Amino acid sequence: MAVAAAARSGMFRRMFTTAAFTPPSPAVGRPVAEPSTNLFVSGLNKSTTSDKLREAFAKFGEVADARVVTDRNSGYSRGFGFVRYSNLEGAAAGIQGMDGKFLDGWVIFAEYARPRPPPQQPGQQFQASGYSSQY
C-alpha cells in the first residue's frame, strides 16, 4: 500500500525524472607530453615480458629499448613499461598502432612519456608536509 500511495503522490516521478539532471562537467585531462622517442605503455598484463613488449612495438619502427617495470621485492610486473624508439617517426607510429590495442589479452595504452620531475633537495620534504626547518 505504501508503494501505491507513493506512486499517487508523484514521488517516483521525482526520483526517476531526467528533467532536473545536469551532466557533470567534462574532466580536465592530464597535460599531454611533448613528442619524444620514449613512450609510456600502461595496462600491461602481469605476464607481459620486455621481449614481448619489444616484439609488439617493433612492427612500427626500430625499437632501441623496451622495458617492463617490475616490483623490487616480488619481481612481478607492475603493469606498465617504457619503449624507446630510435626516431620520432617510429614513436608516433608506435602510439598510433598500439594505443588501445590488445597485448597478451589486455588492452594497453601508449603515450609519450613525461620527463621525471627534478629530485627534491634534502630537507625540503619536511617543509612540504608542514614541518619547518627551525626545529
Image: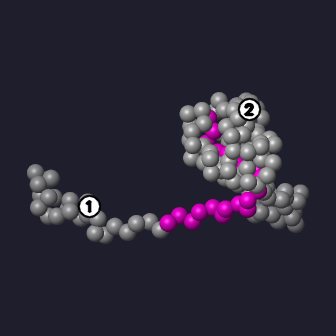
The residue sitting at 77% across, 63% down in the picture is: 128
In which quadrant of the rendered image does the C terminus lie? bottom right
Q: Which mark is residue 3?
A: none
Which amino acid type is marked by label 1? Met
Which sits earlier in the primary sequence, circle 1 or circle 2?
A: 1
User: Does 41 sit above or below residue 10?
Assistant: above
Point out residue 14 in the picture as x, y percentages from the top left corner. Answer: 24, 64
Most foreground residue, 111 or 94:
94
Which amino acid type is marked by label 2? Asp
Magenta stretch, main secondary structure class: loop
Residue pointed to by mark 2: 51
Q: How many marks?
A: 2
Find numbered disc 1 in the image and state the secondary structure of the residue it sits on.
Answer: helix
The residue sitting at 57% across, 39% down in the picture is: 102
Name which quarter of the figure residue 45 lies in.
Answer: top right
Point out residue 124 in the picture as x, y percentages from the top left corner. Answer: 84, 61
Magenta-highlighted residues: 26-45
Residue pointed to by mark 1: 15
Point out residue 35 in the picture as x, y percentages from the top left corner. Answer: 73, 59
User: Does 103 sit above or below residue 120?
Assistant: above
